[in-house]
Amino acid sequence: MMDKLIIPLFAGTVLLLLLLSFIVYFIFLYRKKQRDFELERQAFEQTVLQTKVEIQKETQQQIAMELHDNLGQMASFLKLNLNLMTKTDDVSELIQESKTVSQDLINGIKSVSRSLNQTDLLSEGLSVAIRNELSRYSQKLNFMTECKIDPAIESINKEKQLLIYRMVQEMLHNIQQHAQASKVMVSIDYLTNFVLRVTDNGKGFEPKTVLYGAGLNNLKTRSKMLNGQLDIIPLPQGVTFEITFSA
Amino acid sequence: MSPRYAFFLAFVLFVFIYGLFYFSRFSSPYRWLIGLLGATLATEAATRILFEQTGTTFPVYHFFIPVALLFNAFIYAEIWAGRKSLKWLIYSITVCFLIGTLVNSFTLQTLSTFPSNGILLHCLQTILLSLITYSFMLRFPISTPLRLQPVFWFNTGNFFFYGINFFLFGFFNFYYKSESGIDWTYEINWYSNMILYLLYFRTLYLEQKS
């Protein structure tokens, strides 16, 4: 009987040890994965925070420019008109002009006030925010635009939306700085994958030879944060920035 | 009925009642787990009745195994409800094992025989599903400590219990084919059962708290 018992006893003990070792090994592995996950999460949160600060700074710069270039000019024009009125007899045309400019000035001030009050940039949705930004750049730089955005992107979580918005802003900034483009196209598809494409018809560049500045590096980092990748595709005229991550 | 068996039944009943009491607080996989506990209790009751009347308990297990296979599949599929491909994998594995068990019950080990092959298949299904779950837990970790995750305790209980049972009904049965009544296998079975239901209780307790 003892002889018969030795083999199953031995096999049973080995099995028990194997099961327990497996569970202990799993716990060890899981804790390691959890630490990595925490680090990634912290890095993501930090990037989101940094993005918020950058967007805030960008908004402040926009407001400063709007005050200086637009509203300031209107106020100067009004002052000029008032000066002219003291020297001219027929002031009716000047009054009419001044009325129109005053109204534009009031509208401009309201718009700046709205920008300052806007606590949530994405309150009207990511799609609207991107369209507004594109239209702002288009007015400033006088280029044609085309925009095609899948409405499904509104289902992406807000933190990721913020990163996407900032990436679009950075790409448009890049176009403004270097591309000399007359047309910019923004498209976002969101089916099995999220694909953001920003294409311009400017002078273009060769991605392999260009030195990555802060803008391109930020784009790369943010793409990685979204577990995606950034591709720069040179075209016969211009370039396409493509950011892809799984939906 | 031995006091030890009565104690085991009382404990399973306690876990089942506890589960029913907090049923509304549980997420879908753990509601299925309570269903499995109910099926286990019903099976144990049926074995007692059948034993009194016919002197054998074997037919009950032929019915319990397919039910347990299905409950296992529902529980694991609901744990990974967000991952469609994994759900398909779980159901496909289960269908294969279900066919195997039915073939065994109709051909190799009929109702008058103890379905040790069916139990082996049941063990194998659970071990496979628990290994898949471990692997997906590693792929998608969450920040909650492992000791506070219901899925970890549920999965570990299954892995441990069915790992031991696979050995008992596989290797051991094969080795002792010609003999009967090896007492200490029942001992091991009792202890591993107690550990399993203790871990199920921990699972439900944590789920209820969360």
Image (tube, coloured by chain):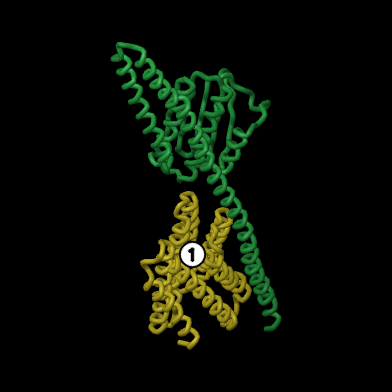
Chain colours: A green, B yellow
Mark 1 belongs to which amino acid? Asn
Residue A132: x %, y % from top left? 42, 31
Residue A55: x %, y % from top left? 50, 38
Residue A78: x %, y % from top left? 38, 21
Q: Nearer the viewer, residue A219 or B69?
A: A219
User: Which chain letter matches label 1?
Assistant: B
Q: Is residue A234 above or below residue A42?
A: above
Residue A142: x %, y % from top left? 47, 20
Q: Is residue B205 above or below residue A72?
A: below
**Which residue in the structure is indicated by mark 1?**
B104
Horizontal placement of A42 versus A71: left or right?
Answer: right
Q: Nearer the viewer, residue A114 or B152?
A: A114
Which residue shows up at 42% across the image and 32% down it? A149
Q: Is residue A147 above or below residue B100?
A: above
Which residue shows up at 46% across the image and 34% down it? A189
Residue A217: in sight, yes or no?
yes
Quadrant housing residue B6 = bottom left
Which residue shows up at 60% across the image and 75% down it? B177
Task: Quadrant for the N terminus of chain B, please.
Answer: bottom left
Q: Residue furthest top?
A: A89
Which residue shows up at 53% across the image and 61% down it? B144
Residue A150: in sight, yes or no?
no
Q: Nearer the viewer, residue B141 or A1?
A: B141
